[in-house]
């Protein structure tokens, strides 16, 4: 991300209505390899392939912000690998981690990983270090520290069904599990900041927050996510949950979130009402059914409808409801950006 993009993002999050509409997309390995014409395994295993694919995306779409920008990642494997999970790779599909515990009662057996030495974490850092100079020549810096959320990591380590059961049946050990994961996540976030002092934002991704009820959200999600966002004094606390978000949205401010990416199943107006006017929103076109599978004409039509239905251009980054999915074409992305640039200036209402 360039300093100009960061400043634009920061102003938008802080409530300054931009002169021109802002578009942005979360991009990583579900989308980049296929779009760039390489296999998923090539993308992970070759630093040069990773760099060139990201560079191609940035140069193809210079008028949009890709978040978090040159994301050094291995799909969903990063955090589970640090806990010792077995990693299963696939040439063209996303990899996955095998479970390491089968019941929440085993939470006490987990050892808090060292982010400097354990799993794939050192490779995440070294990849960014190796490509600092080429990134800087492009005007890009590492601006976000990134981690999956505690519930998300817990679901990787023991399975989603087992986690949900544990939260209901064994809250004591569930807290023990989440405490270990949260302290690890704080250490991981702080280490990223230590290695790249220019980091000024935190991105936490946790879809499992969308699977729990209100009481469970207040007990098992809000306090742990807040602690991670408080790991250092960041300017942007970016939370991604593209599962059901109506339960957790009212607690965003309490979690210290100021930028929120959510499911396309919820309208932007609905989320704005629940989140409050102080939370910047990034969304909300259906990512798979429209952005990936729709025609250019359908992308234009649904994007126009999204803008008109929301009727606001303050504290909003126009995007899709989640990360960029597989198979989104250049034409469809351009259609989205062009339509936003045409439709947003027509809006009259600005929330203050």
Image: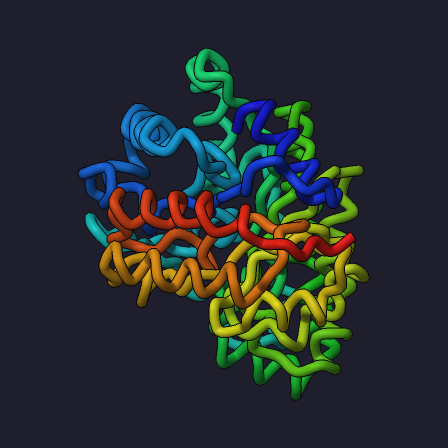
Q: Which percent across, then down, holds residue 200? A: 69, 32
Whether residue 143 is visible, yes or no, is yes
What residue appears at the point 52 percent right and 57 percent down from the top-left corner?
283
Q: Quadrant of residue 296?
A: bottom left
Judged left or right of residue 56, residue 201 is right
Question: Observer-nearest residue: 283 or 215?
Answer: 283
Q: Which percent across, then down, holds residue 340? A: 45, 48
Q: Quadrant of residue 209?
A: bottom right
Say above or below: 143 vs 286: above
What residue appears at the point 50 percent right and 15 percent down from the top-left corner?
136
What residue appears at the point 66 percent right and 24 percent down from the top-left corner?
198
Whether residue 239 is visible, yes or no, is no
Q: How is the image coloured?
A: rainbow
Q: Which percent across, then down, holds residue 220? A: 71, 71
Q: Please state the total of marks drawn on the protein image.
A: 0
Say above or below: 251 vs 188: below
Q: Quadrant of residue 70?
A: top left
Looking at the image, the residue that sits furthest to the bottom is: 169
Question: Observer-nearest residue: 30 or 271?
Answer: 271
What residue appears at the point 54 percent right and 67 percent down from the top-left corner?
309
Question: Observer-nearest residue: 282 or 243?
Answer: 282
Q: Which percent across, then down, holds residue 22? A: 54, 41
């Amino acid at each position: 991300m360039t300093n100009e993009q960061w400043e634009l993002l920061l102003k938008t999050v802080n409530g300054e209505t931009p002169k021109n509409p802002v578009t942005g997309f979360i991009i990583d390995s579900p989308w980049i390899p296929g779009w760039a014409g390489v296999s998923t395994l090539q993308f992970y295993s070759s630093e040069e392939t990773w760099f060139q694919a990201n560079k191609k995306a940035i140069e193809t779409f210079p008028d949009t912000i890709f978040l978090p920008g040159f994301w050094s990642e291995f799909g969903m494997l990063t955090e589970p690998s640090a806990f010792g999970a077995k990693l299963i790779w696939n040439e063209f599909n996303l990899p996955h981690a095998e479970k390491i515990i089968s019941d929440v009662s085993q939470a006490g057996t987990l050892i808090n990983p060292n982010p400097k030495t354990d799993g794939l974490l050192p490779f995440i850092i070294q990849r960014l270090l190796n490509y600092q100079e080429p990134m800087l020549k492009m005007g890009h810096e590492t601006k976000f520290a990134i981690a999956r959320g505690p519930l998300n990591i817990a679901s990787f380590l023991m399975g989603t069904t087992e986690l949900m059961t544990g939260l209901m049946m064994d809250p004591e050990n569930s807290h023990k599990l989440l405490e270990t994961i949260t302290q690890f996540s704080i250490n991981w976030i702080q280490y990223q900041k230590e290695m790249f002092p220019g980091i000024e934002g935190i991105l936490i991704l946790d879809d499992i927050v969308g699977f729990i009820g209100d009481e469970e959200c207040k007990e098992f999600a809000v306090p742990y996510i807040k602690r991670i966002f408080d790991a250092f004094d960041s300017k942007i606390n970016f939370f991604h949950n593209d599962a059901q978000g109506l339960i957790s949205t009212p607690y965003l401010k309490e979690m210290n979130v100021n930028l929120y990416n959510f499911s396309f199943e919820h309208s932007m107006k609905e989320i704005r009402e629940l989140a409050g006017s102080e939370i910047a929103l990034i969304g909300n076109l259906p990512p798979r059914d429209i952005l990936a599978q729709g025609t250019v004409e359908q992308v234009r039509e649904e994007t126009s409808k999204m803008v008109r239905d929301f009727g606001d251009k303050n504290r909003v980054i126009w995007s899709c409801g989640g990360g960029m999915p597989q198979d989104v074409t250049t034409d469809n992305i351009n259609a989205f950006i062009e339509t936003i640039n045409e439709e947003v200036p027509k809006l009259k209402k600005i929330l203050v």
